[in-house]
Amino acid sequence: MKFVLATQNPKKKEELVAILGDLGVDIVTEEELGVKIEVEETGETFGENAALKAKAVMEATGLPAIGDDSGLCVDEMNGAPGIYSARYGGPGLTDADRCALLLEMMHGVTDRSAHFETYIVCAFPNGDWFAAKGECHGSIAFAPIGTNGFGYDPIFFRTEEQKTFAQMTAEEKAAISHRGNALRSFKKKLAKYLTEHPES
């Protein structure tokens, strides 16, 4: 069964293929199909935005589509930057700029608890759909540490490992991350769906 990934990011395809490879599914990107769908993220939650992406790409290609949305939620900031994580502070900012802005907003704050969240939605042309969620809890560091990863990884600290995400190897991070957790849940749900719909 062929699925199209609602993203322009080739790394996300590699990640999905690695997780779903043994299910015998074929993952293709929008680019490989010669389409580029610009989806306006008007949802108020990660789940709504992931569903918007999946549905738009499914309708454009006629294939089952997988969309996702992720972000960082800081308790003291009422869940911000949340769905605006990638756009926090406005256009033109780098990952380092956004980390610096967030640290500035957290100056003097003692409760630094935060979590990353990911939603993955799969939409089928027959109207079926399902979603998977993953979270990873930690805290906001007082300064960036580490050079791996991307986004807010240098300032997201895990007490259990005594490391930020940016200090972890890709394998260490995948074992505990919000995205890794969501992908593992998604795989179980997809395997169940394929078993129940062998004609797909």
Image: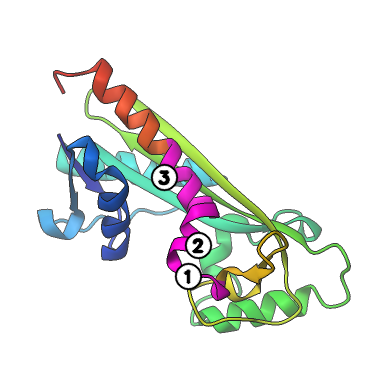
Left or right: residue 61 compared with residue 8: left
Q: Which residue in the structure is indicated by mark 2?
A: 172
Is 170 covered by the magenta stretch? Answer: yes
- 151 to 100, vertically: above or below: above
Helix, strand or loop under label 1 = loop
Q: Identify the colour scheme used.
A: rainbow
What kind of residue is marked 1? Thr
Helix, strand or loop under label 2 = helix
* Circle nearer the N terminus (3, 1): 1
- 45 to 138, vertically: above or below: above
Q: Which residue in the structure is indicated by mark 3?
A: 183
Real-space Cα separation, disc 2 to disc 1, in angstroms: 5 Å
**Numbered label tally:** 3
Q: Quadrant of the N terminus?
A: top left
**Segment tinted magenta in the rendering:** 166-185
Q: Which residue in the structure is indicated by mark 1?
A: 169
Q: Quadrant of the C terminus?
A: top left
What x and y, as percent, mark residue 71? 56, 57
